[in-house]
Amino acid sequence: MTRYIIVDDEAPGRANLRLALQEQPGWQLQAECDSAAAARDALARAPADVVFLDIQMPRESGLELARELGRQPAPPLIIFVTAYNTHAVDAFEVHALDYLLKPIDDRRLAQAIERANAMLGLRQHDAYRAALHGYAAATHTQAMDSFHVRSVGNIEQVRVRDVLWLQAAGNYVELHLAQRTVLHRLPLSRVEQLLRPDEFLRVHRTAIVRRDQVRRLSVVGDGRHEVTLACGAQLAVSARHLQDLKACLGFAGQ
């Protein structure tokens, strides 16, 4: 039995979600809460496997509650349900399992249920907890040791030390490893804040490289600069980051 709670300050929102979930086999509603404080009390009385959580609520937002839950030894899966699409990046930063927009689409809800069932059924909950705890630790230390990359029913741990360079891909980032590339659901600007500046260097608005991968700086075409990495990758260098790259190579000021 999958136990869940619904957290939404608006009664119609709670009712709509409750009705939509009633037909889900093996899912049991444990509590309905109109605030983050009420949800905290409900979870203290009886832990849940999944929390359907609104983001914009009076006094305390769903994002604040999600961050708090993520620091617990055994956090529940978080599925955000909101009328606003502007918080999607923030939601995935706290490793929400999914992000549903109101009015809830039956197909998207079914996908979220499938992801939750897969995560719980394939015994991936421990990996999910590790991802939450890793993010919580990174927000305090401003550095992290591993990425936790999610797909349906699975979380893969990618060590930061194995990443050779990173490239922006919209609200995602490509993690370039020795043998493959992994797509991670965070923007490059946010990832940069969690990397150690003594290990990584930004060379372009779309690229960050590992410092010990830098091998050569070249002038190409009409005066543009390009850096060559030990792995063979060749990346554009912007004027804004040129001096930092020269310093990395040992000839700053030239």
Image (spheres, rainbow, N blue to C red):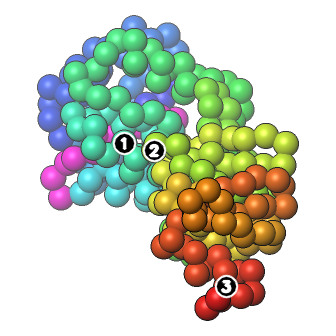
Which residue appears farthest toward the bottom when viewing the image? 253
Spatial CA distance of label 2 from label 1 is 10 Å
Task: Residue at 71% x, 66% y: name it.
Answer: 218
Residue type at tag 3: Ala
Mark before the other along the chain sequence, 1 or 3: 1
Q: Amino acid at mark 2?
A: Asn
Give 10 or 223, whichever is nearer the viewer: 223
**In front: label 3 or label 2:** 3
Classify mark 1: helix, strand or loop: helix
Rate crowding at label 3 as few (under 14), some (14 to 19) or many (20 or more) other CA atoms within 10 Å: few
Residue 114 location (% of width, % of height): 54, 19
Q: Position of residue 168 (x, y in %)?
A: 54, 49
Magenta-tinted stretch: 49-59
Find residue 235 and report its image quarter.
bottom right
Residue 135 position in % (x across, y down): 56, 59
Numbered badge on residue 247 = 3
Which disc, if any, is residue 171?
2
Residue 234, placed above or below residue 141 = above
How crowded is the residue under tag 1: few (<14 C-alpha within 10 Å), some, or many (20+)? some
Q: Which residue is mark 1?
A: 88
- Sequence order check, earlier mark of 3 and 2: 2
> Is residue 140 magenta-colored?
no
Residue at 28%, 37% in the rendered image: 85
Q: Is residue 252 left or right of residue 169?
A: right
Left or right, 187 with reference to 99: right
From the viewer's perspective, tell me whether residue 252 is left or right of residue 45. Answer: right
Q: Earlier in the sequence, mark 2 or mark 1?
A: 1
Residues at marks 1 and 3, CA–CA distance in whole angstroms: 37 Å
Camera-side mark, 1 or 3:
3
